[in-house]
Amino acid sequence: MTSDCDLAVALRRGDERAFASLFERYRRPLYAFGLRMLGESHAARDLVQDVFLRVWERRDQLDRPESFRSWLFAIARNRCLSDFRRSRPSIALEDAPQDALAVAANDGGPERDQDLALLRRALARLKVDYREVLILREYQELTYAEIAVATDSTQSAVKSRLFKARRALHETLKPASSQRR
Amino acid sequence: MDCNAKQEQLSLLLDGETAALEQADLFAHLGACADCRDWFDTLARLRGAARRDREEIAGGADDLRPPLPSLSALPSRRPAAQRIRGAGWTWRLRVPLAAALAFALLAAGALLGARWPLLAEGAGAIAARGGRAPVVVICSLPDVTVFPQGVGQ
C-alpha cells in the first residue's frame, strides 16, 4: 500500500488520483472525528467534504508530506472550532443529538454497551479543549507529537491537557461508575 | 501518597509514554491504591469503548465521494488551458485596440509627413542647439452621430 507520505507528495503536484486515495483512506476517521466533535451526522459529513476541499486548495502549503495526518486533523479541528464559534458554543447533554448518544448494537453484553453509551454522553459533556485531545488520542490514535501539530500546541501541553481531560472524563463518569461497583 | 501525581503518570502509562522503571513503580502503586486502580481501569475500559465506537460510527461516511467535480470550480489551481480560455474576453478587447492604435499612429505620421515635411529636420536642429524638441500629441475625439431632425424623438 502506498504510504501517506508518497500520496501527499503526489497530491502536492496536483495528482487527483492521490487526492482520491487519501480521501478513501481518511473519510471514515475524519467522519468519526467530526461526529464526536460536532455531535451530528450531517455536520460530520459536511466536515469531511469541506476538509478535503481545503486539502486540495491548500496542497501547496503542505510543507511536510510525512506529517500529512496531523495536517489533515489540524484542518479538521480548525473547521470544528470555527463551526463552534459560528453556531454552537457547546453541546449540552440534553441538547446532544441522538447520533451522539445512540447506544451501540448489542455485540458484547450490556456492560460493553453501557461503556459505549457512557463514553458518548461524557464526551458530549466535556469542554471542547478536552474533547478534541481525547478524540485525537483515543479514537484516532495520534501520537503526542501529532496531536501537538494538529492542535497547534506543544507535546508537554498535550500531555497535560490529556491528563486533565481524562480526569474530567472520570469525574463525569463517577456516579455511574460507583453505581456499577 | 500523592494520587494526583500518580494519575498524571498513569495517563502517560496508558499511552505507553513511561520508562520501564517508572512502570514498575506505577504497577506497585496500582496494587496498593484502590482509587488509582479504579481510575486506570475506567480509562482503559473507555479506550476500548472508543475504538469500538470509532468502528461503529465510521460507516456513516462510506457513501461519501471525493469532492473532485468541485475542483474545476476552484480558483487557485485551474488547468493552463482553462486559464487561457477564461482570459479570452481580455484578449478579444486588446487585439482590436492595439490594431486601432497602430492604425491611428500610422495615419498621423503620414499626415504630418505630408503637411510638414521639414518637421523632423527642424526638431533635430532644435535638439542640436540644446533646446527642446517639439512634442506632438495625438488624441482622438469620440464619434458623434448627428441625427436629422425628428429622428429618434
Image (cartoon, coloured by chain):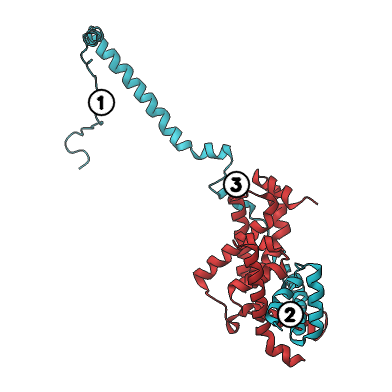
Chain colours: A red, B cyan
Residue in front for this viewpoint, A111 or A177: A177
Say the numbered circle drawn on residue A60: 3
Please say whether residue B63 is visible from this viewpoint: no
Mark 1 to mark 3 CA distance (whole Å): 48 Å
Q: Residues within 10 Å of mark 2 (few under 14, many from 20)?
A: many
The amino acid on which the numbered mark 2 sits, given as a three-letter code, is: Leu
Dots 1 and 3 on the same chain: no
* Label 3–label 2 contact, CB within 8 A: no
| Host chain of mark 3 | A
Q: CA distance from mark 1 to mark 2?
A: 82 Å
- The quarter of the rendered structure image containing the C terminus of chain A is bottom right
Crowd around label 3: few <14 · some 14–19 · many ≥20 (10 Å)? few
Residue B78, disc: none
Q: Is residue A53 visible?
A: yes
Residue A14: which quarter of the image? top right
Q: Residue at x 70, y 51 (%)?
A: A66
Left or right of B126 on screen, residue B85: right
Query: Measured along the vertical axis of the image, is residue B57 above or below residue B87?
Result: below
Q: Are marks 1 and 2 on the same chain?
A: no
Query: Picture quarter containing residue B44?
Result: bottom right
Position of residue A134 measured from the top left corner of the image (x, y, whole percent): 67, 71
Q: Which mark is residue A116?
A: 2
Query: Is A116 above or below relative to A17?
Result: below
Question: SS at mark 1?
Answer: loop
Query: What residue is shown with label 1?
Result: B139
Residue A8 percent across, percent down from the top left: 69, 49
